[in-house]
Image: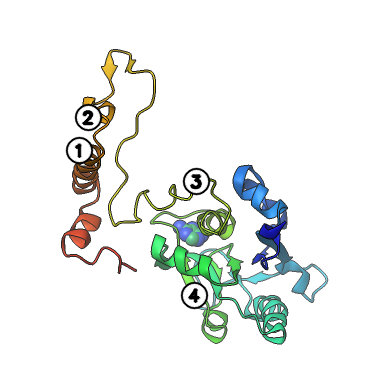
Amino acid sequence: MAKTERKPWRVTALTLFPDAFPGVLGASIIGGAEKSGIWALETVDIRDFSTNRHRTVDSPPSGGGPGMVLKPDIAAKAIDSVASADVLSGDERPLIYMTPRGKPLTQKRVRELATGSGIIVFCGRFEGLDQRVIDTRHMEEISIGDYVLAGGEVAAQVMIEACVRLLPDVLGDATSASEESFENGLLEYPLYTKPREFEGRAIPEVLLSGDHKKIADWRRKQQEEITKARRADLWQAFDQGDDHERD
Ligand code: ADE
């Protein structure tokens, strides 16, 4: 009972495809956490703010070029319907626009977002959103990686899942969020479990030694080797001692 007394971490997703939610967010521990009131998801259909008969929301880019652009008047109305309710309730949330042009999402930003009262996330489609709405509504542009998805819905779900798993009482084991990749600026060490031998490969002897200091040293060395080999960028930041300040 005590667990549900805290106000839920609130997510409002603005989208042209409300059916795409909750998607993966309805499954497993994240879905369970919503059911128990730790977080709450609401979707807003951007198309509901179109005023014309055909419910169109887009038009061709000024200056020419491929595709269509989401109209600023419709996007603004959709955003304002949510943001003004936040202002009235005194509980303003960051407004995030998922776009491959955005700043890359990091575990540091995820931690910050999870600490607040929730997020409003705008899922783009088409070629993009009219720049004037991005500017006037002070949208924070976030990308989940250097590749292009068909729209922002999956990207939003990635970001929401990363935040929700950090909320209090979501992960069973309190240590499982603190010893993983990125939390100390390094990638995670390799994991093993029974059986002792699998297809001719043994579990590294040190892990069965019971010597906690030796195990911790071995894991740390593995983290460093893996990070050096796979992520020169992370390794450099770590080596320069700014591992917790990456943004
Ligand atoms: N929309 C399309 N591609 C995306 C990406 N890589 N990150 C965030 N939003 C997107």
Q: Which residue occupies the foreground of this view, 13 or 17?
A: 13
**Three-letter amino acid code at the position of disc 2:** Val
Residue 133, above or below 66:
below
Q: Point out the frontmost of discs 4 and 2.
A: 2
Q: Point out the frontmost of discs 1 and 4.
A: 1
Q: Quadrant of residue 85?
A: bottom right
Q: Which residue occupies the foreground of this view, 204 or 71?
A: 204
Question: Picture coordinates of residue 116 (x, y %)?
Answer: 55, 72
Q: Which residue occupies the foreground of this view, 79 or 205?
A: 205
Q: CA distance from mark 3 to mark 4?
A: 32 Å
**Three-letter amino acid code at the position of disc 4:** Glu
Q: Secondary structure at mark 2?
A: helix
Question: Picture coordinates of residue 12 (x, y %)?
Answer: 66, 67
Q: Which residue is mark 2?
A: 206
* Crowdedness near tag 4: few (<14), some (14–19) or many (≥20) residues, C-alpha within 10 Å: some
Judged left or right of residue 73, residue 165 is left
Which of pointers 4 and 2 lies earlier in the amino acid sequence?
Answer: 4
Q: Secondary structure at mark 1?
A: helix
The answer to whether one can see residue 13 in this image is no
**Three-letter amino acid code at the position of disc 1:** Lys
* Crowdedness near tag 2: few (<14), some (14–19) or many (≥20) residues, C-alpha within 10 Å: some
**Three-letter amino acid code at the position of disc 3:** Asp
Q: Which residue is mark 4?
A: 140
Which of pointers 3 and 4 lies earlier in the amino acid sequence?
Answer: 4
